[in-house]
Amino acid sequence: MRWITRIIIDALCKRTYKRRGLTEMRARKRQPAHPGRILKNHHLDPLSMKIAELANVLGVSRKTVSKLANERGSITPDMALRLSRAFGTSPDLWMNLQKNYDLWQASTHSGDWKRVQPIKLSGPMHDSA
């Protein structure tokens, strides 16, 4: 029954977001955690692992891991693969964390995208009958 409830809630939310003009992105009030914060708080700290140790395991420079852990770097697909292999997670986890963080940053710190007007499509493929 829980999945049915989730579907109903999602449908109601989509309707609300569409009315507000937010069809592509859910309105988020809180900033999502940076992937580096997740790395540090959920992996490095509990394991008492130093940045240099993780860098050695991942086969990257200490500076690369330091930038990430201190929230000054971004997760690349290559890094997502390395982290997923090292910690037994999926690469999608790391990429989604980065995507959510980046989208939130772009949507809250830049208003330029709000000036873009939707393209009105017409024709047999796009007309609703």
Image (cartoon, helix red, strand yellow):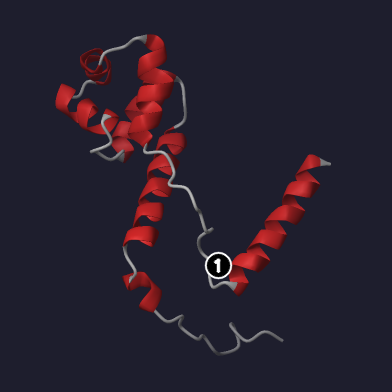
The extreme top residue here reads 48
At a point 21% along the width and 26% down the height, the residue shown is 66
Task: Report if residue 114 is visible in the image.
Answer: yes
Identify the amino acid type marked 1.
Answer: Thr
Image-quadrant location for residue 98? top left
Give the answer, above or below, for where 35 lies relative to 25: above
Figure label count:
1
Q: Secondary structure at mark 1?
A: loop
| Label 1 crowd (10 A; few <14 / some 14-19 / many >=20) | some
Residue 42 coordinates in the image, percent (x, y)? 43, 22
Looking at the image, residue 107 sits to the left or right of residue 23; the answer is left
- Which quarter of the figure is the N terminus placed in? top right
In the displayed structure, does residue 128 sit left or right of residue 27?
right
Residue that carries the numbered disc 1 in the rendered image? 23
Give the residue drawn at x 53%, y 67%: 22
The residue sitting at 37% across, 38% down in the picture is 34
Q: Where is residue 84 drawn, in percent x and y?
A: 40, 26
Q: Is residue 61 visible?
A: no
Q: Is residue 125 left or right of residue 110?
A: right
Above or below, 100 against 44 in this view is below
